Image (cartoon, grey):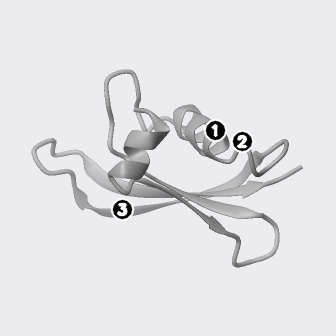
Amino acid sequence: MQRSALQMYGQLSIAPAQAPGYDYLVKVGNVGDIGYNPDEYKEREMVALSALKTQCAQARVVGETAIHHGTVPLQGKPAKTYFMRVKCG
């Protein structure tokens, strides 16, 4: 799934850090698409770093928290939101 589609459906957002140790908090929902599995860490990482490419030089994920909140309608899989802590430089 492309970044713009994730953003359009509210499944991708970026916020400045609220604590020391990282620069941005990237929210990635686990809405999948053909060729994209948001439950795979490397795919979420790619989306998060790509979303910050222009504003965060040499970005790297320094932590992640997953919040479980029920199941995905019609799919029956666990619904999750991943919060990725990203450090610049």
Q: Amino acid at mark 3?
A: His
Q: Earlier in the sequence, mark 3 or mark 1?
A: 1
Answer with the quarter of the image where residue 16 lies.
bottom right
Check whether the beta carbons of the residues at disc 1 and disc 2 lie within 8 A of each other: yes
> Helix, strand, or loop for circle 3?
strand
Residue 68 numbered tag: 3
Name of the residue lying farthest toward the left: 74
Q: Is residue 61 left or right of residue 66?
A: right
| Residue occupying image coordinates x 23% and y 45% | 77
From the image, tell me which residue sits under label 1. Answer: 50
Name of the residue lying farthest toward the right: 89
Q: Residues within 10 Å of mark 2 (few under 14, many from 20)?
A: few
Check whether the beta carbons of the residues at disc 3 and disc 1 lie within 8 A of each other: no
Q: Position of residue 47 (x, y in %)?
A: 56, 39
Mark in the foreground, 2 or 3: 2
Q: Position of residue 7 (x, y in %)?
A: 43, 50
Marks 3 and 1 sit apart, C-alpha to C-alpha, by: 24 Å
From the image, tell me which residue sits under label 2. Answer: 53
Mark in the foreground, 3 or 1: 1
Q: Position of residue 11 (x, y in %)?
A: 39, 53
Answer with the quarter of the image where residue 2 lies.
top left
Q: Amino acid at mark 1?
A: Ser
Q: Amino acid at mark 2?
A: Lys
Marks 2 and 3 sit apart, C-alpha to C-alpha, by: 28 Å
Q: From the viewer's perspective, is residue 36 above or below residue 63?
A: above
> Helix, strand, or loop for circle 1?
helix
| Residue occupying image coordinates x 13% and y 51% | 73
